[in-house]
Amino acid sequence: MRVEIVAVGTELLLGQIADTNSKWLGEQLALAGVDSHFHQAVGDNHRRIVLALRTALARGDGVITCGGLGPTHDDITRQSIAEVMNVPLERDPQIVARIAELFASRGRAMPESNERQADVPHGATPIPQQLGTAPGLLCPVGNKVVYALPGVPYEMQEMFTRAVLPDLRRRQGEAGETGVIVSRVVKTWGMSESGLGEVLAKRIAALDEAGGNPTLALLASGIEGIKVRLTAKAADASAAAALLQAEEAHVRAAVGEAVFGTDDETMESAVSTLLRAQTKTLALAESVTGGLIAARLVNVPGASSWFRGAVVAYDSRIKHSILAVPEGPVVSEAAARAMAEGARNVLEADVGLAITGVAGPEDQDGQRPGTVFVGLALEEGSEAVELHLPGDRERVRQYSAISALDILRRRLLGVRA
Amino acid sequence: MRVEIVAVGTELLLGQIADTNSKWLGEQLALAGVDSHFHQAVGDNHRRIVLALRTALARGDGVITCGGLGPTHDDITRQSIAEVMNVPLERDPQIVARIAELFASRGRAMPESNERQADVPHGATPIPQQLGTAPGLLCPVGNKVVYALPGVPYEMQEMFTRAVLPDLRRRQGEAGETGVIVSRVVKTWGMSESGLGEVLAKRIAALDEAGGNPTLALLASGIEGIKVRLTAKAADASAAAALLQAEEAHVRAAVGEAVFGTDDETMESAVSTLLRAQTKTLALAESVTGGLIAARLVNVPGASSWFRGAVVAYDSRIKHSILAVPEGPVVSEAAARAMAEGARNVLEADVGLAITGVAGPEDQDGQRPGTVFVGLALEEGSEAVELHLPGDRERVRQYSAISALDILRRRLLGVRA
């Protein structure tokens, strides 16, 4: 199967938004073993969308379009596909009813323009929406196919996974294409890309020599650390999973506690797992990160069983008044410890985690931007770690947040940072 | 002039890296008044690059390629262009000497593979490199043109600005094309895409009738609201700015206070501007958003002059103990008001903003997921607003955060939400 991605939207051509949909779809198709030799982007123009679709169908077996399914007069992907199929558009009353219902559930009347979202090219099958108003379309063109997906990323992703991928798999099966390619990502924090490369160099060479299955590759992902991507080819998913399982054990043995999770696991979910296992509750005192750590923690399902809350002491006076930090410089090891103790006491938790520092651009308390102190308070006492982080305000904040969580993670693991 | 961008690199198709080059080039071409109706991405495969180039030349006046000019056997853009031009590649000894010199200046010998970077299709003009080793190419194809640029973003950008843009301008002049295209984005919150479309329908029709300059288009951007893009063509930048200025006034008059900013302005910067103008300080009490609002606010430069801090009361007991919320259901209008008053008192601010609600998936205090109460406490008293928001936990949180900031913004503007 060769499938071309056609992203629709003038804003893509004008560089006003980045085409993250094609990147995501490219990755998913590769994982599914579907070839994608070309991507195109095209504006909201009927003649050009038709040309892009015909070009794509001429050089592949199928096309996935993203965007142009909204209710406005700019949204013309439906019409363009109908022209390529050489069929009329037909309004589907069931879809109209579903969209009207959605508006009603939010206490609003459906604007008439939304009825256009119920237009379906004759012979196409609508893909029901589960998150927004625009249904997708599955459109046969001879023995080829056009899938039309909405441009809103999370709607597109949900619809691809639920409806497009199974249809592609079925077509692969009919074409006698078998085998799967499966990847797993091992996530690390605290090692440089080159440091991790050195630790894994021998293993990567050994895998190459043995035929390159599985393979290992390093992916720098900025503020979320360095990832190691393991990719295995096998006859079926369970055989691939077995290869990945064995390889993950090799990587973990080589890299050690810098590994904090795999795939969808995050630094905060790693912390959550440890806190739950030790039946400890957590409270935060945030200054430089301004609520960023709390906002990450509450995204972990079940956080309410161990997360008490946070005091965001952005104004220094709050450090003294609520957290009982003694007067003196607030960007210091002593202040970080006092903040952690204050959070632990005031919010009545087993563990207090605190962070104070300088995001910049100006110095504060004689400390340079990027200087950050992480404080930890536990039943047995308190401690603090000094960090020096690179980047502008936003990056210092992001690095501070994940660094503080990593310090807590290692402490809960019984490892000194 | 219609110029197509062709990004070369298998890693783009596999979704391993994002195609930021096409976005940047799209923006630059639009600013230069050059039409770009299509973008393509293609892998490191000779036959397919040739096909992509022929497709692009057939539907435009020129092509800009990015990538595939490196020294490895994967870098085959030069050969592919030579085939499209139907000419041989010739090695340029001056370029070989320049690359060798560059290596020598870093104290290294030039690997033989780098000599390939000196290959130039017969009849093409090399564009000297100033930052790396790969020269670019300016390749006439009949009366059309292919510009080949390296894939490294900063090398590509420098070379585009220095060599490609002036050549495009010269071609535009020969074709009698002059002028610039400039865009501005007006950001709104609180209206649906279709509702906004109806409010603006007359104006869009009037602009269309008047010749379509400027133009208006709606862009849904998910949790950050709906944007209205204004695009103006004019002889020069200041004439375009004047058109945009006048059109922005039309849009603001039609849409009203749902407009919260333009271009880089955010909901939090709008709130910041109002608080500073009114010399008021702000404190937060966050429950369902878990610190998300605070994390947004501290990203506004100068937030320390008006943002006191936040109490993230994720555990209900903290609402009672620190914020002095009376016992009773914590997802309620009364609790939201009490939280706002508590934050205002405990954190000693002029304005208290509070949010409590149910992110889901389970009900809480008899309320459904997506039910959110926003409380506001000011010197003159407190109030609360009930919201019903769609989506999963993460989206309910994100919508809650921007909705709460919008309620504060409208209140500071003197408008009831």
Image (tube, coloured by chain):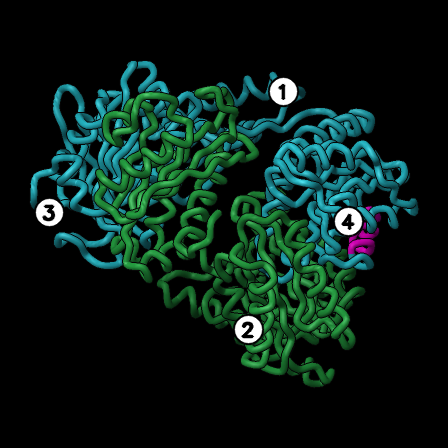
Chain colours: A cyan, B green
* Up-down relation of residue B58 to residue A356 (above or below): below
Residue B414: name its quadrant: bottom left
For disc 2, the chain is B
Check disc 4 and give the amino acid type. Thr
Q: Residue shown at 41%/21% (left/top)?
A: A302
At numbered mark 4, what does the secondary structure look like: helix, strand or loop?
A: helix
Between B209 and B113, which is closer to the camera in this rendering? B209
Helix, strand or loop: magenta stretch: helix
Q: Nearer the viewer, mark 4 or mark 2?
A: 2
Q: Residue shown at 35%/49% (left/top)?
A: B297
Q: Is residue A57 magenta?
A: yes
Question: Do badges 1 and 3 share one subunit?
Answer: yes
Q: Which residue is mark 3?
A: A329
- Reading the chain from its start, which is encountered first: label 1 or label 3? 1
At numbered mark 1, what does the secondary structure look like: helix, strand or loop?
A: helix
Residue B317 visible in the picture:
yes
Whole-number angstrom distance, CA of label 1 to CA of label 3: 57 Å
Whole-number angstrom distance, CA of label 2 to CA of label 1: 58 Å
Check disc 3 and give the amino acid type. Pro
Q: Which residue is mark 1?
A: A237
Check disc 1 and give the amino acid type. Ala
Check disc 2 and give the amino acid type. Gln
Whole-number angstrom distance, CA of label 4 to CA of label 1: 35 Å
